[in-house]
Image: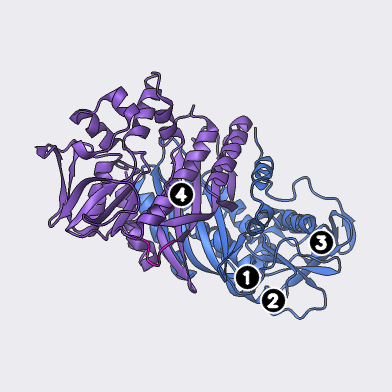
Chain colours: A purple, B blue
Amino acid sequence: MTTEPAFIDQLRSIATDPAARGLADDAAVLTVGKQALVFTKDMLAEGVHFLPDDPPCDVAWKLVAVNVSDLAAKGATPLACLTGHTLTGDAAWDSAFVKGLQEALDHYSMMLIGGDTISAPAGTARVLSLTAIGLPSVPVPPPRAGALASDGLFVTGTIGDGWAGLQLLQDGRTAPQSLIAAYRRPQARIADGCALAQVAHAMMDVSDGLLIDAARMASASGLAVRIDLAKVPLSADFAATFGADQAAALCAATGGDDYQLLFAADSEAHLPVAACRVGGFGEGSGLTISWNGMPVDLPKKLGWQHG
Amino acid sequence: MTTEPAFIDQLRSIATDPAARGLADDAAVLTVGKQALVFTKDMLAEGVHFLPDDPPCDVAWKLVAVNVSDLAAKGATPLACLTGHTLTGDAAWDSAFVKGLQEALDHYSMMLIGGDTISAPAGTARVLSLTAIGLPSVPVPPPRAGALASDGLFVTGTIGDGWAGLQLLQDGRTAPQSLIAAYRRPQARIADGCALAQVAHAMMDVSDGLLIDAARMASASGLAVRIDLAKVPLSADFAATFGADQAAALCAATGGDDYQLLFAADSEAHLPVAACRVGGFGEGSGLTISWNGMPVDLPKKLGWQHG
């Protein structure tokens, strides 16, 4: 079967315009006339990216938030979007989805300007998509590939909360509201992204997991990256439920669904936004991790690895 | 279950910006800074919009062509696109799809700048989407809703060839190459769309069927529309296979998959592009049809009616 990376390699061979950024970035940056625009398109499939019994208004929220998070990672503010929706015969689900869509679009000040709706063949899992259009706040949105060997690696907010919320929901355990919200209603960091775009040499959002996303940034930048798991910022609710030891930090750093901003910047730079320095770059390639400076073996899975 | 019109009504209530054109047009027209852009997003689902044994390179072609056709209907030229692709485990299919995608993008001079690829749950029908971005050739792209009561109704090219190709393929009959090509490799009429945008008061592409699309244009414009079936332009290959009588013309006018341009213009206007006058608008509402001026009852199905 085709894996996602193999298929994207094939697409990459025809996506040769610089606007595509080699299909290796969170978003495309296209300049039309004198107007630069940022474009992203993310899909959510039922059973893969959301649970069949997740509240439909939360699924809509997440569809918007994951796309807006890609815009935020390029220092862009949301402007407009187009939806792609498959109807599968459940009117209540679809109505609740539209309600959640409206809430999310209002929250992120994004206009719905078009899209397509199709009736899916019976038995089909829902496949939902959004194409989001954003306005960059800087002339050249920070790429994924711009880290320097002397840069530190920073992340906003806390890591692991979305993963924790999903685990607790799947296990049927009582979960702190903050963790469920992190899974179901992630917050895209638009203002932070715009501020950080001024100083970040490379930036992306943490969607698949801190470790795998950091490894991708390093690979795109032609560098090695190191992360100290003890520096990974954990929330109080996460630590109260899963602990804050090395094993817990490793779960947080590989869980994904964070939608925090991961960026490379001068270690001495004044950051306009609160962020934790979790590691740094260097010459070479690959990812190494440690716990308070002591080397730690890489886990088998660095995060959500597509296909 | 939710029908597509009912769901789109719900979306319409939140798509209030003029750029959305009430979700009742072929495409959105968004002005950013001083730059007007046209956006459209069309999906194709396996088993609904294409046959499981259709050649994948033709499916890719069609995905591009139906979107570019929407741009053409707004007098816009294609600029860039983002894809949405579900992998279902058939590497040969996906590779052939990419080959067809490249052919179509080269043909229409459109850049691939991004998108998303997901691995679909087992048993899922393929759901493919494209978001296309176009540059309008006129300051205000012709809406669907702009017909005047004194306007004639015109259509480019010939009608029914795509429908005919599909019928012959489904029946396992030998089909003239032109009809198969019309079904599998529709041609979006970009140059015609740009030229006609100068004179058309309303314009759309014929995707669901001449009758239903004309009825939609009339409804959007708050007018009645009449079509003389005897004036519907049929190709020589269509006529040789299905005849050219009233029944054949009715099949052609309700079959859909034409991707010709349907437009309202002053009956006396000089048209910059060859087109047939198939009818005209008037005060009132609804669609009436005739055969050489003699009234004909409306068929039960005016075309491809979603949901």
For label 4, the residue is A68
Query: Which amino acid, mark 2?
Result: Gln
Q: Secondary structure at mark 2?
A: loop
Q: Is the residue at mark 3 from the same chain as the one at mark 1?
A: yes
- For marks 4 and 1, give the one nearer the viewer: 4
What segment carries the magenta color?
A137-142
Contact check, label 4 and label 2, Cβ < 8 Å:
no
Please state the horizontal and vertical placement of residue A54, each as a whole percent of the image. Answer: 48, 29
Assign the C terminus of chain A to one quadrant of the image: top left
In this view of the protein, can residue A47 be seen by the observer?
Answer: no
Please state the horizontal and vertical placement of residue A108, each as a whole percent of the image. Answer: 52, 47
Q: Is the residue at mark 4 from the same chain as the one at mark 1?
A: no
Q: Chain of mark 4?
A: A
Query: Which amino acid, mark 4?
Result: Val
Residue B227 tag number: 3
Q: Chain of mark 1?
A: B
For label 2, the residue is B198
Query: Which amino acid, mark 3?
Result: Ile
Q: First in sequence: mark 2 or mark 3? A: 2
Q: Secondary structure at mark 1?
A: loop
Please state the horizontal and vertical placement of residue A5, each as a whole percent of the image. Answer: 30, 49
Query: How far, Cα to Cα, is label 2 from label 3?
Result: 23 Å
Q: Residue at x 49, y 46 (%)?
A: A129
Q: Is the residue at mark 4 from the same chain as the one at mark 2?
A: no
Query: How far, Cα to Cα, is label 4 from label 2?
Result: 37 Å
Q: Residue at x 68, y 74 (%)?
A: B196
Contact check, label 2 and label 1, Cβ < 8 Å:
yes
Asked if the stretch drawn in magenta spans residue A138, the answer is yes
- For marks 2 and 3, give the one nearer the viewer: 2
Tell me the chief SS of the magenta region: loop
